[in-house]
Amino acid sequence: QDKLASANAAARDGQLTKPPGSLGRLEELAIWYRGWRGGDRAEIVAPQIIVFAGNHGIAARGVSAFPVEVTAQMVMNFQLGGAAINQIARCMGATLDVVPLELDRPTRDFTTGPAMEEPDLVAALRAGWEAVSSESDLLVVGEMGIGNTTSAAALACALLGGAPSDWTGRGTGVDDAGLALKANVVEAGVARHGGAGDGLEMLRRLGGRELAGMAGAIARARSLRIPVILDGFICCAAALCLERTESGALDHAVAGHRSAENGHARLLQALGKTPLLALDLRLGEASGAAMAIALLQGALACHVGMATFAEAGVSDA
Amino acid sequence: QDKLASANAAARDGQLTKPPGSLGRLEELAIWYRGWRGGDRAEIVAPQIIVFAGNHGIAARGVSAFPVEVTAQMVMNFQLGGAAINQIARCMGATLDVVPLELDRPTRDFTTGPAMEEPDLVAALRAGWEAVSSESDLLVVGEMGIGNTTSAAALACALLGGAPSDWTGRGTGVDDAGLALKANVVEAGVARHGGAGDGLEMLRRLGGRELAGMAGAIARARSLRIPVILDGFICCAAALCLERTESGALDHAVAGHRSAENGHARLLQALGKTPLLALDLRLGEASGAAMAIALLQGALACHVGMATFAEAGVSDA
C-alpha cells in the first residue's frame, strides 16, 4: 500500500461536498483503492474479469446436480457471449477473459490421492498469473467447474476446521441425498489430506485447476497493484489458500458479495471480509463480484469528480 | 402489473443457462420489472434521477448540523455537476433533473401549525408529477433540504407509531443535544397533528415540498408504468404517505438501499421492502438508490441477453 496516496485520498475525502462519512462504505472503498493503486491513479476505466474453468475427479462421485460435460459447454457459452457473466461484463464496461484449464484432464478424485501433482498446480497458478493484464485497473476472478463447491468445501474444512456439513451446500442444486454425499466426500478428503501442509499444499491436494488459476491471478494482481474483487464461495476458498500461506495476501482484495451457498458467510468471516452485496446469488462465473464493479466505479467517480466545499461555495457544518 | 409480461418473463428466466434460482434477487428484479413495464420492454436504457429540494420552517429550531443556506448552495452544486449524485448519475448513464421548490419560502414550523397549506401541497405534488419524463424506463427520486430528516421522522412517527426517538437520527451529523432536540420537535409535531388525517394530510402537516415532490413523482411513475427505486429515510417517508393513502401504491417500487440513518431499517420493514444495498450511506440526494440502478441494469441485461439451454447446447440438470 502507498501510504501517501491513502493519506491524500483521505484528506480529499474530508473536503468533498457531503457531511463527513455520509457516503459510508463508498468513502472507505475509494481510499482503499487509491492506496493500492498508488499515486494519482484513481478512476476505474479498465476492469478485467477472468473466469477460469477446470474439471474435477470427484464429479464422477455424483456431487453435482449437473453432468461434467457442462463445464466445457459453459466455456463455449462464455466464448459465444450467452452466459450471465457476458451480460454483466458488458453492463460494467469490463473485459472478460475465459481460461479453460485442461478440461479433458480432470483432477484426481481427492479421496484417493492428491487432486494435482506439483507440475499441474504450478501450471494452473502460472496460467492465472499470466492471465492478468498489466493494463487493468481492477480485477475480478471467478470460475466454472462441475463439482467445485465440493472441492472448495474440503479446502475450507481442512484449513479452518469445523464439520464437513458446515461447509457443504447445495451448489448448483443437489437434493438432500446429494448434500449428504458431498459431506461424506469432504470428510474423506479432509481425513486423507488435512494438516499435510500450508495453503498452497492444500490447494494442490484438495483444490482444482480453476481454483489455482484464481489464486495465481489474485497474487499477480498484488504485484501489479491492481485491486481485486473476490467472488463467491469457490473464489474465496482459493483466496483462503493464499491467505493461509502468507498472512495479509488478500489485503488488496474486497469481497464482492455474500452468496447463497452454505458456508460462504462463514468463510467471509474467516477472511475478515464484509461483502459489498448480498443478493442470494449462487451462480459462480464471477457474477456476484462483477455486479460489485459498479459500486467501486461509483465510489471512485464520487471521490474524483465531486467538488470540495471551497470549490462549490457550500457552507461547512 | 401486466400478468402476461410477468409470466413470460418467469418462463424465459427458467430456460436461461444457469441453475434455477442461481441469480437470486436479480431474477426476481427482472420478472418484477418486466411485469411493470409490460409487453416486451425489458432493457433499461433511459433511467431518470430527480432530486427535489425544499426548505423547512423547523430548520430554524436548530435541528440540523448545517445552516439552512446549504439547501440552495447544494442545488447550485447539483446544477454545476459537483455533488455525489452528479458523479453517480454519470456512472449509471442516468439523466439527472434538479427541482428546487420555492427555497426562499420555507414551510411553516410544524410545531406551530401545518407545514403547508393545501395549495402549497398540491403545487409540490404537481411539480413532482410533471418532472417525470414519459420516456424514462426507470425512476429514482431523492431530496435535499436542511432539516428534512426531522420532517421525515415526524411523518413516520405519526403514521407508524412508536417513540420519537425510534425515528430520529443524526441526519447530516448532529450531536447528542441536537438529537434530543430533534426528538422533542418530532414529539411536538406528532402531538399537534397526529391522527388528523390520512397519508397525504400528514404529508401536508408534517412534510415538506421536496417530500411532496417525491410523492408526486412516484405516483406519476405508476401511471406511466415506470418502475421506481426508493432512496433513503426521507424518500421512504414520502413514499409511506402514498402507501397509507392507498394500499399497494408502492408495488412498482423497490428499496434501493438501507441507509445509516436511524429509523430507516424500521421504515423499510413497515413498507415491506428489502433493500438492495446496505453500504451505510446517509447522504440523501438519491445517492443510494442511484447506486442500485446498476443492479437493475445487470438483472435485466442477464434476463434479455443470456442464451437458453437449448440455444447454447448446454445440458440441463
Image: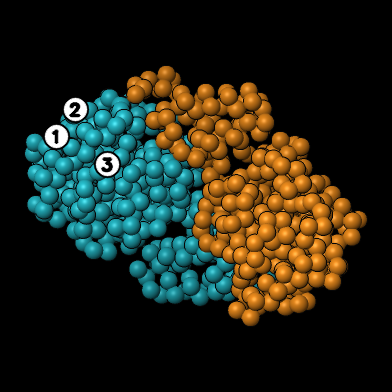
Chain colours: A cyan, B orange
Between the C-alphas of marks 3 and 1, the distance is 17 Å
Sequence-wise, the earlier of marks 3 and 2 is 2
Disc 2: which residue: A60
User: Is residue A154 rendered to the left or right of residue B237?
Assistant: left
Q: How far apart are labels 3 and 2 at the CA level?
A: 17 Å
Q: Say which of marks 3 and 1 sits in front.
A: 3
Q: Position of residue A127 (x, y in %)?
A: 24, 44
Marks 2 and 1: in contact by CB < 8 Å? yes
Determine whether A134 is above or below A313 in the image.
above
Q: Quadrant of the C terminus of chain B?
A: top left
Q: In this view, does B154 lie above or below B212?
A: below
Query: What's under tag 1, amino acid-wise?
Result: Asp
Circles 3 and 2, Cβ within 8 Å, touching? The answer is no
Question: Mark 3 or mark 2: which is in front?
Answer: 3
Query: Tag 2's secondary structure?
Result: helix
Judged left or right of residue B127, residue A203 is left
Subunit bearing disc 1: A
Query: Same chain, marks 1 and 2?
Result: yes
Residue B14, image x and y in percent? 47, 25
Q: Earlier in the sequence, mark 3 or mark 1?
A: 1
Quadrant where the N terminus of chain B is found in the figure: top right
Which labelled disc corresponds to residue A168? 3
Rendered residue at 45%/37% (across/down): B23
Task: Identify the residue at horizontal 84%, vertical 49% (top origin).
Answer: B126
Kindly identify the amino acid type of the residue bearing the numbered disc 2.
Ala
Q: Which amino acid does label 3 sit on?
A: Thr
| Location of mark 1 (residue) | A109
Residue A92 numbered tag:
none
Q: What element carries label 1?
A: loop
Q: With B83 as the anchor, is B18 left or right in this view? A: left
